[in-house]
Amino acid sequence: MNEKRVTFASKIGVIAAAAGSAVGLGNIWRFPSQAADGGGAIFIMVYIGCILLFGIPLIISEFLVGRLSQANTAGAFHRLAPRTHWKWVGRMSVLSAFLIMGFYMVVCGWTLDYLIQSFSGKLRTVNDFSANFTALLNNPLRQIGWMILFTILTAFFIISGVKKGIEQSSKILMPMLFLLLIVLAVRAIMLEGASGGLAFLFKPDMEHVKPTVFLDAMGQAFFSLSIGMGCMITYGSYFNDRTNLTKTAVQVSVLDTLVAILAGVIIFPSAFALTANPGTIVDELVAGGPGLLFITLPGLFNQMPASMLWAAMFFCLLALAALTSTISLMEVVTLYLHEEYHFSRKRSTLLVTAGVIILGVVSSFSSKFFNLLDVTSAKFMLPAGGFFICL
């Protein structure tokens, strides 16, 4: 290790990159879904408790492992415990990040498809969005095209390096994401009848609290903060000695939670203001899934004046949230190849890009393979990785 390691150049860059890693599509559709099913404010309070008790300490731990080791996720464990088998924990995190990209990039490609479609003016009703989504799912080549484009876009930032690629992109993308969130949230609150949605989200509803609310909140906290994926260890390795790990972990957690709550402020008031039967939308929220993002919500926004603008802003928001998270996921695998196999950054990125595209192609043709990657990574490998990091 004779070569001096590149570090983030500014405090803002550190926070933007780490928060960008945590923020993703899950904040926008998974958190509102869990809140709808967990008693509104009850779930939010339990979730914040889980962030304080588990999330922030684990992020600090991952940051610390990365900074102390100055290495990729697998190399970090090996350097800190060279005579043990802990390196396999890091390798599992790298594999998790790779498998997640294999299906997540397909969904990210959908956001680009819908962003372009929203400008066409052809998608105006829920039926239009539903028909477009069905056509998209039934056309693997269309999905593959957008998936490849999104993967190449992500790779561009990775090839550009830590400072010019990851840090600079995060400093631009994160403010844009928050600006769109705030504009959409303000617009949703101003709708007539929005107060019912705000009450549903922020008023404790003991009747709908499930016994599993704690486990649901803890799972959402792990998922939302990217714990166990190797992202925070990787980014922690780019922190200099002056970076305050505790302060950074708190700031990242606050920003990530704020994105999730703002997403709820957009979704619930819109549902209550723009539909005759808000309960139907709430049921769809509880069910979760991509249909909420690509059918129901766009159909609601298109009932507003200047509907094309609001739909375009919404899908731009989704694309930005997706991009900030895919950059961190790809960096985890790229840095592993770069340091463990001594490939150049460019070659490592191209290899990862090719592998992700191959998985994405299979996922586009096979929903079973898509679901297999989802379940294997999210329900088995990530929790296992988080558990071993705790040890």
Image: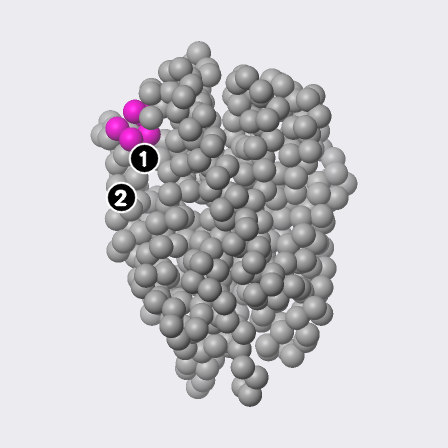
Vertically, is 96 above or below 194? below
Residue annotated with mark 1: 38
Q: Is residue 329 visible?
A: no
Crowd band around label 1 with a 10 angstrom C-alpha radius: few (<14), some (14–19), many (20+): many
Q: Quadrant of residue 158?
A: bottom right
Stretch in magenta: 199-203
Work out whether residue 316 or residue 76 is closer to the camera in this orientation and state it.
316
Residue annotated with mark 2: 46
On the image, the x and y values in percent for residue 258 come to 38, 43
Q: Residue visible at 40% across and 36% down?
A: 262
Q: Is residue 92 magenta?
A: no
Crowd band around label 2 with a 10 angstrom C-alpha radius: few (<14), some (14–19), many (20+): some
**Kind of residue sitting beneath label 1:** Gly
Q: Is residue 298 left or right of residue 216?
A: right
**Kind of residue sitting beneath label 2:** Val
Vertically, is 235 above or below 265? below
Look at the numbered disc 1 and give the secondary structure of its residue: loop
Main SS class of the magenta portion in the image: helix
Q: CA distance from mark 1 to mark 2?
A: 10 Å
Q: How many numbered badges does the structure rendering display? A: 2
Q: Quadrant of residue 299?
A: top right
Q: Residue visible at 58% across and 21% down?
A: 307
Look at the numbered disc 2 and give the secondary structure of its residue: helix
Colour scheme employed for the rendering of this structure: one colour
Q: Residue visible at 57% across and 66% down?
A: 162
Disc 1, disc 2: CB below 8 Å? Answer: yes
**Can you say which quadrant of the picture contains the N terminus?**
bottom right
Q: Is residue 202 magenta?
A: yes
On the image, the x and y values in percent for residue 340 come to 59, 77
Q: Is residue 180 visible?
A: yes
Sequence-wise, the earlier of marks 1 and 2 is 1
